[in-house]
Image (cartoon, helix red, strand yellow):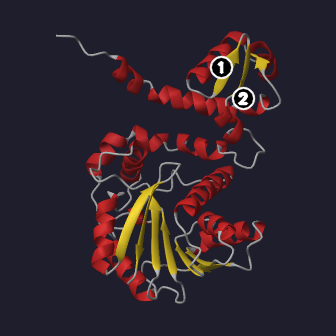
Amino acid sequence: MTRPSLAPLLELATAYQRSRVLAVVLELEIPTRLATGSRSAAQLASDLDAHPLAIGRLLDAAVALGLLVRSGDCFADTPIAAAHLVKGRGDYLGDALLHSARASQAWSELGPRIRAWRPGPGTHRPSTEAAPVGAEIDGQHRLALLAGEALAEAVDLSAHRRLLDLGGGTGAMSIALCSRFEQLRAVIVERAGVAKEARVRVGAAGLRERIEVTSGDFVREPLPRGADAVLLANVLSMLDAGEVRALFARAYDALPTDGLVVITGWMLDEHATGPLLATLLSLEDIALDAPDVERPWPIYAGWLAGAGFEHIQGDTLDPPLSWLVARKP
């Protein structure tokens, strides 16, 4: 009997080291330093007051991880690093990626937190230990903008006029969708503190006349009327099953005939075995004591049908988020 290779186990065991390479590459601003052209390890080491051998090992690891390319003694950014890891560029995601490193405390205690966790409303106080702060908020906003642009490519809202964005965060999804569909206006409902940040972002995007931001609790308070589309982006995993079903029913009542519900998030597949990122983020929800976790998309589809929605369909986006749309007959 052939012994199975140990490589998969060793790759799993060193996953943390891989993420630390990414974090240190960002902390030392290596892609930014290479944005103007390739450089050697010795040149970068001189800039960073480090030993060339240590920097060289870091750069070689970054090459192996697909962040850099090497030609002779010189290193350069790969296309993905040039697009998303260079400070000052519009699609810079370094701050959002570094945010993941701050969740390491929760992950280091994953075992006991898994054993202590129980689902249910009213008994949980989700931890703020991994909430984005400072520049991380900018990074999360840019990441959400990219997801919103991908959603705008996948879901046609050209026949809709008013979008109700429930739990719209900093407004990135509404900004992306309104930028794509010129006839669309949006109302974002968020908690007061987040709503204040969303107003700043909407103003910076030049969409203050088309996107309204209101403070409120969309789970317990009446939904604003007049929308012909409702967006639920990355919010359902924070609600328990009863709250989600009740929200679907309230959205159905608030929408006109032919009104649309759009759901997007890190939904699991029909077997609840992937995508891997969605599974990992569900574990992070547990580690941070959320009242519930993300669910397979067929569960949401069934709840939407139970609320009266029809023509339910969906797919995946890049980044690997999933989406569902359902229409009120």
- Give the percent coordinates (x, y) of residue 115: 26, 47
Q: Is the C terminus in the top left, top right, bottom left or bottom right quadrant? A: bottom left
Q: Residue at x 39, y 83 (%)?
A: 252
Q: Residues within 10 Å of mark 2 (few under 14, many from 20)?
A: many
Name the residue: 72% across, 12% down.
51
Percent position of residue 248, x then y: 37, 77
The residue lying toward the viewer, choosing from 181 and 49, is 181
1, above or below 83, in the image:
above
- Tag 1 near tag 2, CB within 8 Å: yes
Considering only vertical position in the picture, is 37 above or below 123?
above
Q: At 36% across and 73% down in the image, what residue appears?
A: 311
Front residue of 17/205: it is 205
Determine whether the residue tagged by mark 1 lies in a helix, strand or loop.
helix
* Distance from the alpha carbon under mark 1 to that under mark 2: 9 Å
What amino acid type is highlighted by mark number 2?
A: Ile
Q: Residues within 10 Å of mark 1 (few under 14, many from 20)?
A: many
Viewer-nearest residue: 184 or 89 = 184
Residue under numbered circle 2: 30
Please state which amino acid type lies under the numbered disc 1: Leu
Depth check: give the residue in front, 126 or 148. 148
Q: Is residue 26 above or below residue 161?
A: above
Label for residue 36? none
- SS type, badge 2: helix
Decide if residue 230 is on the left or right side of residue 122: right
Mark 1 or mark 2: name the one nearer the start of the chain: 2
**Residue 59: mark in rendering:** 1
Residue 313 visible in image: yes
Can residue 49 be seen in this snapshot?
no
The residue sitting at 61% across, 21% down in the picture is 63
x then y, percent, for residue 132: 59, 53
